[in-house]
Amino acid sequence: LTRITSYNILAQCYVRSSYFPHSPSSCLKWKARSRNLVNELAGLDSDVLALQEVDQYEEFWQPWLAERGYDGVYKSRTQLTKSKRDGCGLFFKRDKFELLARRDIEYNDIAWGRPVGYVHPEGSPEPTEAPVEADGGVNKYIRDCVGVLALLRSKTATDGYVMVASTHLYWDPAHADVKLAQARRLLGEVELFLASNSPIKRSVPVVTAGDFNSVPGSEVHSAMLGGFGGRRLRSAYAAAIGEGLVVGTDGSESSVTVGKHGEPAHTNVTPGFTDCIDYVFVDDGVAVRSAMPLPGRDEVAAGLPDATRGSDHLPLTVDLELWSR
């Protein structure tokens, strides 16, 4: 089995006590948060980590992950809107996997009308000015959101290949159209990346994880389930809930508060917003064997981060059988 975690770890550059008035200020300090985050990740001991809102990558996360046995790829947010310098990462246990190929996704490419698979010409500078609309406003697709794809080869399974994605879509509920364009772009990038790098004739399993900033039943959620190139996707955590496969560390079945469309009721918990916006989407060839429990609303009633959880999101962790024996 391969354990995969998707987790928006809340970049410190976004932490202000005014954004998280419900969290004791001691829980918001980087020293406390980083300790809680590494404790959570060490406890999960996942084979693959799809992380979002990773900042302090070179100073903190890269050394910690390397020490824990992870290699990986990291893509920092683009800077056209002078955005914060967090990013998305994909990290894998180096004794389990090796990296064969990667692809960085910059959703700003939508604004320029660049085709899926666009590669920036070497030596020519990226534009420093965003494209402007007729009304003088900046093109709505310039949001500096990113993602990263990786093709991994198993070191333990023969012909064991998997494509994993980590992404973070735009947050604003007023711009559902921007999120949907980003989700469609992601699916197009996954399809092309697989076609360009597929090492075997049969289809490579696909795991697409991240913070999609979209609730179950939204257009983004539906688009992701629709998949690409005739390959449908499904939510691994919803599948685990539906089949009674959410199990605690002791192996006993755990109850999860179920929300819309069979998804967990919440992956992001603050007094102002509590809902499911994080997902691990897998294709039909991937068998979901179990999922780690999420705390109930009563356990996180005051909102996150708290004294033991370092982010306003919860980690989604699933055990997958990627290759049938």
Image (cartoon, rainbow, N blue to C red):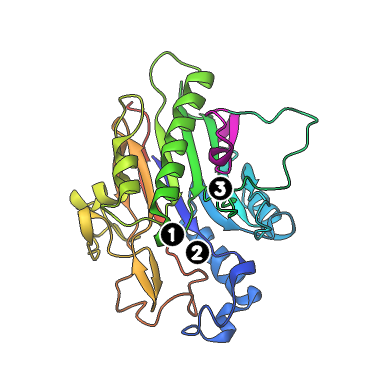
Sequence-earlier tag: 2 or 1: 2
Tally the numbered discs. Answer: 3
Eye-nearest disc, 2 or 1: 1
Q: Which residue is mark 3?
A: 134
Residue 135 x/y as whole percent: 55, 53
Q: Residue furthest front?
A: 135
Is residue 270 positioned above or below 101 on the image?
below
Q: Residue at x 38, y 79 (%)?
A: 271
Mark 1–mark 3 distance (CA, rounded to whole Å): 42 Å
- Is disc 2 in contact with disc 1, using a CB cutoff of under 8 Å? yes
Q: Which residue matches tag 2?
A: 40
Hey, which residue is sitting farthest left in the picture? 243
Q: Which mark is residue 189?
A: none
Secondary element at tag 3 = loop
Q: Amino acid at mark 1?
A: Pro
Which residue position is annotated with label 1? Answer: 315
Q: Is residue 112 magenta?
A: yes
Magenta residues span 96-117
Going 43% across and 41% down the picture, which residue do you hit? 208
